[in-house]
Image: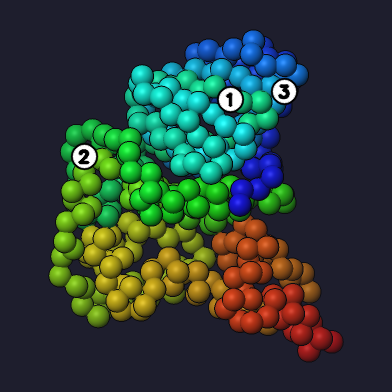
Amino acid sequence: MPPDRPLKKDSFFETDDPEAARDALERAVGVTSFDVSRGENFFFRANVVGFDELTLASYYDRGGTDVGFAADDVVRQLICVRGSYNFEIARRQAQTSPTAWSTFVPQNESYSLTAAPNSALISMRVSQSAVRRKIEALVGDCIGGEIRFEADTNTTKPELESLRRAILYAASELSFQHATYCSLAKSELQELLVVKFILAHANNFSHLLARKTSAAPSPWQLRRVEEYIEANWSKPISIEDLAAVAGVSGRTLLRHFRDWRGTTPMNFIKQLRLRRSKAMLENPSPRTTILSVALQCGFQSPGHFSRDYMNAFAELPSDTLKRAFRRHL
């Protein structure tokens, strides 16, 4: 389920002045039109989280607004989390709601949306450079020419639902309100979202992603990957990093690492970080807190950290910390 107010920590603006909302959106995302004549009781709120090559934003529209967006060299995924929206994208029309599949906008396409009153959506914008680098990492080779995505008419693909869940998970993770973001968590959320996006949408390089993987890496290559993870668990780790260490494509690594370890490299990293967090909690300093350990180990949300810790060790991190403090009294 999406959070009640996605990305609430990063308020971009909220206003009951249509002109102020129009000006802010024109500067930020290239709005070409902003018509509030259909609705009453206007109020508009925007929250934005910027990554290196990706932006997540949430918009709440109380009155119901018609908005036009200029074409841009990014791809966009739009998920309705409240109310409903009608979209027009390159003369194609679509409607979305919280129970319907989200709307995809290819690069260099203008689009417009019509919001019903009391509607909200989450928008993900991904740069071409991020998409290119991730496709190259997955196929293990450079690709030439423009990357062109196509709107997929098969809205029941499991990859699409996986992308939707990932976006809602990221919005939930980034909605936890404390002083700073965990740079480790943000970096790997970006990694997750870009890879999920590429796998969910057909493009002119999809045939390279679908082809049979090369021969399985040798055990020593997979052990090198594990050793790299062990040595760099506290830093952002990308599929590009792991593929380079193994000397194979990202797709080959992902497939055969699962055969080798029974899990994905990213889940292996997560489990390692949970073990590190347990060691920290078992040997605390007077200033150790659940939040500080969660952030060091790449968890933005203490709630998600506690859930995963419980699943791994059958107790809450607070129980581990209390026991350790009692032992040191």
Instruction: State the residue in front, 255 or 202.
Output: 202
Instruction: Say which label, 1 or 2, has the lower sequence index.
Output: 1
| Residue 221 against residue 10 in the figure, above or below | below
Query: Residue 43's mark?
Result: 3
Rendered-image quadrant of the C terminus: bottom right
Amino acid at dot 3: Phe
Q: Can residue 289 be seen in this view?
A: yes
Foreground tag (1 vs 3): 1
Q: How far apart are marks 2 and 3 (CA)?
A: 41 Å
Q: What is the x, y in percent for residue 124?
A: 48, 38
Residue of label 1 = 115
Q: Would residue 169 appear left or right of 253 to someone viewing this image?
A: right
Residue 204 image label: 2
Q: Position of residue 272 (x, y in %)?
A: 50, 75
Give the image quarter of residue 83: top right
Whether residue 295 is visible: no
Residue placed most toward the observer, 112 or 54 = 112
Q: Amino acid type of disc 1?
A: Ala
User: What residue is rendered at 64% in x and 13% in y?
Assistant: 38
- Does residue 152 appear left or right of residue 54 in this picture? left
Residue at disc 3, secondary structure = loop
